[in-house]
Image (spheres, grey):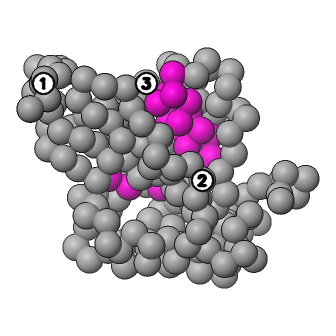
Amino acid sequence: MMDKVVMDKVVMDEVRHLWIARHAFANEDETGLTGDGEQQAALLGERLAGVPLSAVFHGPLPRAARTAELVAAHLGDVPVEPAEELDDNLPTPANSAAMIARFTGPAAVETHELLITHAFQVAWLVRDALEAPEERWRGLNACNTGLTLIRYFPGQKPRLIMFNDVSHLPAALQWTGFPPELRP
């Protein structure tokens, strides 16, 4: 049995599987999703239907909330909750501390959680898991509904399992959210 890690007086001895996705393709005024975005969200939900998710958390903006709603429609009885920590602000150590504290590290019980957030926050969570310098997060971009998985093991460094995986999307929907000059 693995050694237990004590954090904030709670025994943390199980793996946290943190699934992270950028919201789906937003309409021009960012108050909702385009038709392509609605399709991306539904396909992400289908992809995650077999994952034993315990919760879906989403950023407070409408594009993240709508994406979470469409994804959750494929997940059964999984709670969906807004999370102010998943806002669309440029991350810094100060303003992202609450996000890191709430969503990273081992868990009290093995858990699979999904975060629907923004490209900035996806990149910051990956940077944090890799212990990369703060200035390195800006080089990471995520496609709309690109899926990232980080696992947090007790007593070990986090493991980045996948980053920006879009295999659930048809080719025409895969690179939305990337500037045209960076698309393959």
Task: Point out the tag, 3 or 1, that comes first from the N-terminus.
Answer: 1
Q: Indicate yes or no whether the magenta region holds residue 116.
A: yes
Locate the N terminus and report the quarter of the image it occupies.
top left
Q: What residue is pinned by disc 2?
A: 164
Residue 4 x, y percent position in the rendering: 12, 24
- Number of marks drawn: 3
Sequence order check: which comes first, mark 3 or mark 2? 3
Type of amino acid at the residue the image marks with label 2: Asn
Q: Residue at x 23, y 50 (%)?
A: 111
Q: CA distance from mark 3 to mark 1?
A: 23 Å
Vertically, is 110 above or below 71?
above
As displayed, is residue 68 above or below residue 2?
below
Q: Residues within 10 Å of mark 1 (few under 14, many from 20)?
A: few
Residue at position x 47%, y 62% in the image: 65
What kind of element bears circle 1? Answer: loop
For the residues labelled 2 and 1, the Cα–Cα distance comes to 31 Å
Q: Which residue is mark 3?
A: 97
Judging by the rendered image, the residue that carries numbered circle 1 is 4
Front position in the image: 167 or 89: 167
Of the pair 32 and 22, the residue shown nearer to us: 22
Q: Please tell me which residue is depicted at 53% across the width and 57% down the height of the picture.
A: 147
Which amino acid, by three-letter code, is at mark 1? Lys
Q: Position of residue 2 (x, y in %)?
A: 14, 29
Label 3: state its secondary structure. Answer: helix
Disc 3 vs disc 2: which is toward the camera?
A: 2
What span is in magenta?
113-131
- Depth check: give the residue in front, 95 or 49: 49
State the image quarter where residue 6 is shown: top left
Q: Is residue 86 left or right of residue 52?
A: right
Q: CA distance from mark 3 to mark 2?
A: 23 Å
CA neighbours of label 2 inside 10 A, class few (<14), some (14 to 19), many (20+): many
Q: Secondary structure at mark 2?
A: strand
